[in-house]
Amino acid sequence: MLTLSYPEALLMIGGYLFGSIPVGPSVAKAMNRGDLRQQGSGNIGATNVLRVLGKKAAVLTFAGDFLKGAVPVAMARHLSFREGVLLVVGFATILGHLYPVFLQWRGGKGVATSLGVFSIVAPSVAGIGVVLWMIGAYGGGVSSVGALMAFGGLPIVAFFIADCPILIFSCIVSLFVILRHKENIRRLIQGKEKKISS
């Protein structure tokens, strides 16, 4: 069982709080566009920002959410923490995005933040995940298809090119992200899921 030292536990808590930063809503407020959660799909991620605020705001949101995942884990690596600690910090950061304390626990779906975490703990896995997302999202024009392809494929990719801890981590994170897309899956089955440009 992994036990954390005091500094490691502090970084884990810091990762959760960092992950809780509401990038999308902050971008909307900075543009004087009100509460993002009351517009479009109500989601705080880059896809809804794209529909509501446009491409530049969506790029800012994706970059911010990606960095939320990457920065705490990069800090843990810089401090020479163990791989297990990096994964714990990364998972705490993802949970912060999914269930942010600053938004009454109503967060995003975790795609960009999770990819940010994987970019540090398993860059090759992250890179293939991005390719899968692009194929799914831009091939069919539906962002959720890209997310489901990416995180459905991550454990398979990790099985072939990563070690056991990364494989287990991939399975856990993918499960959370896919569960957050349950409404998207329902709409896909019904043929009602909106395209990226809709």
Image (tube, helix red, strand yellow):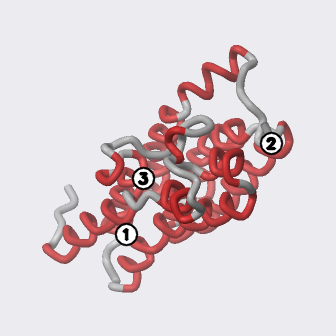
Q: Nearer the viewer, residue 47 or 112?
A: 47
Q: Residue at x 45, y 74 (%)?
A: 71
**Residue tagged 3:** 97
**Mark 3: few, some, or many residues within 10 Å (few <14, many ≥20)?**
many
Task: Measuring from the top left, give residue 25's x and y in whole percent.
Answer: 50, 54
Q: Residue furthest left?
A: 6
Placement of the N terminus among the 4 image quadrants: bottom left
Q: Amino acid at mark 1?
A: Glu
The tag earlier along the polypeptide, 1 or 3, is 1
Mark drawn on residue 8: none
Q: Give the structural element (helix, strand or loop) at label 3.
A: helix
Q: Nearer the viewer, residue 90 or 196?
A: 196
Task: Measuring from the top left, give residue 168's x and y in whole percent.
Answer: 43, 48
Q: Is residue 3 left or right of residue 83?
A: left
Q: Residue at x 35, y 48 (%)?
A: 103
**Residue tagged 1:** 83
Q: Nearer the viewer, residue 145 or 23?
A: 23
Q: Nearer the viewer, residue 49 or 167?
A: 49
Task: Measuring from the top left, give residue 190's x and y in whole percent.
Answer: 70, 14
Q: Residue at x 40, y 61 (%)?
A: 21
Q: Quadrant of residue 54?
A: bottom right
The tag earlier along the polypeptide, 2 or 3, is 3
The Cα–Cα distance between marks 2 and 3, rounded to whole angstroms, is 24 Å
Q: Relative to 31, is 159 above or below? A: above
**Residue tagged 2:** 197
The tag earlier along the polypeptide, 1 or 2, is 1
